[in-house]
Amino acid sequence: MKKIVNSHRFFGSELLKVSALILAAVLLSSLQSAAQRRISIPSESKVEKDLIALCDIAEVSGEKTEKICGISLGYAPNIGMTREISRERIALSIAAAGFSAGEFQIKSPEIVRISRRGQHIDRSLIRAAIENAVADMFSSSALEIRIVRIDQIPVLEGPVGTVEVRTSLREVANPFAPFALPVEIRIDDRVFRRTAVNVELEGFADILVASRDLSTNSGILPDDVRIERRRLERTPAYYLRDFEKLRGVKLIKNISSGSEITADSFVSAVVVRSGDLVKIVGQSGAMQITVSGEARTSGKIGDRIAVKNKQSNAIIQATVIDEGFVKIYF
């Protein structure tokens, strides 16, 4: 009877030892499993940035530290393209970051396909930029400007980010002939695409036209011209819109009645010649005096010439302001 009791005690003790070992093994396995980071990666992912980080495509269990989340997997593909990364390549990148094989477990297909998340560039942004550029170009002029045509704006898809469209008419030689307008599209202040959009404008302005036939080498008097509102075919600087600009000029070609007075139809003429009697206008602030003088050199309006003050016989430098008039400031 005593032997039977001892036998039971022996087997009970051994059973407790085995149970303890099993429990320890289970606990150890659980601790090891908890120490491992489980990294789950789907077969396909979309990213937004130029560089792919691990946490951009993976779910990482446990504490997500910057060290593991920031592991670089290289460059993202361009919009519309796909890049393939193998599970082995991902494991090597994680190991290269200082993690041992026992610290992580990867759950992913053999090949992971990565594409770039994008956004459609709103065509209205491009059109608005063109309209603003036109308004800015002619904001200080008394012109009537209308956009006749903006060709079909291309459909563009770019990376995710803040879109800015830049364009300007400053380099357009003739805004009133159809032209291709350069457009720069920036995303997050980086150039994404440069393109061109065909634009046509229509402009009207009050310009000077001949009120009678005018001959070569003749001057232009106020009665020789009139103002008419006309559609512009050339850049605004090509047309005359101010009577003052006709002072001291002579025609270099014949102009028929009703034709525009254009910048290439005249040149500045000499209005004061050496030996001419002139009026010397001296000005100091609001005070002005006039004396008689004699031109010692010839000049056009705006030129500085030598003149002799007939009262003092002094030779002075004066600016030609019109036929028979020069001016000095003191």
Image (spheres, helix red, strand yellow):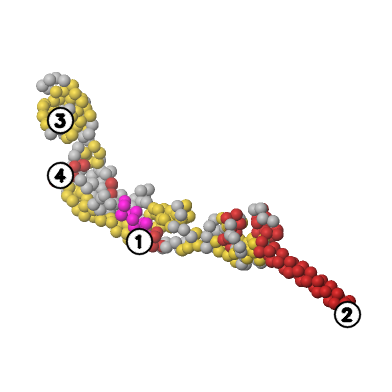
Name the residue rendered at 60%, 59% in the picture.
54
Asked if one can make out residue 164 in the rendered structure from this viewpoint, the answer is yes
Q: Earlier in the sequence, mark 3 or mark 1?
A: 1
Give the residue at mark 4: 222
- Identified by mark 3, the residue type is Ser
Q: Amino acid at mark 1?
A: Arg
Residue drawn 24% across the image and 37% down it: 268
Q: CA distance from mark 3 to mark 1?
A: 54 Å
Badge 2 or badge 1: first in the primary sequence: 2
Q: Which residue is mark 1?
A: 149
Mark 1 or mark 4: which comes first in sequence? 1
Q: Is residue 136 magenta?
A: yes
In the figure, residue 147 lies in which quadrant? bottom left
Q: Which residue is mark 2?
A: 1
Q: Where 309 falls versus 101 (above or below)?
A: above
Of badges 3 and 4, the one in the foreground is 3
User: Whole-percent x and y of residue 228?
Assistant: 19, 53
Magenta residues, as a range? 127-137
Q: Position of residue 301 (x, y in %)?
A: 21, 34
Crowd tier of the residue under label 3, counting other residues whose Cα lies within 10 Å: few below 14, some 14–19, many 20 or above: few
Between circles 3 and 2, the one closer to the viewer is: 2
Whole-number angstrom distance, CA of label 1 to CA of label 4 = 38 Å
| Left or right position of 289 against 34 | left
Q: Amino acid at mark 2?
A: Met
Q: Residues within 10 Å of mark 2 (few under 14, many from 20)?
A: few
3D distance between C-alphas at marks 3 and 2: 142 Å
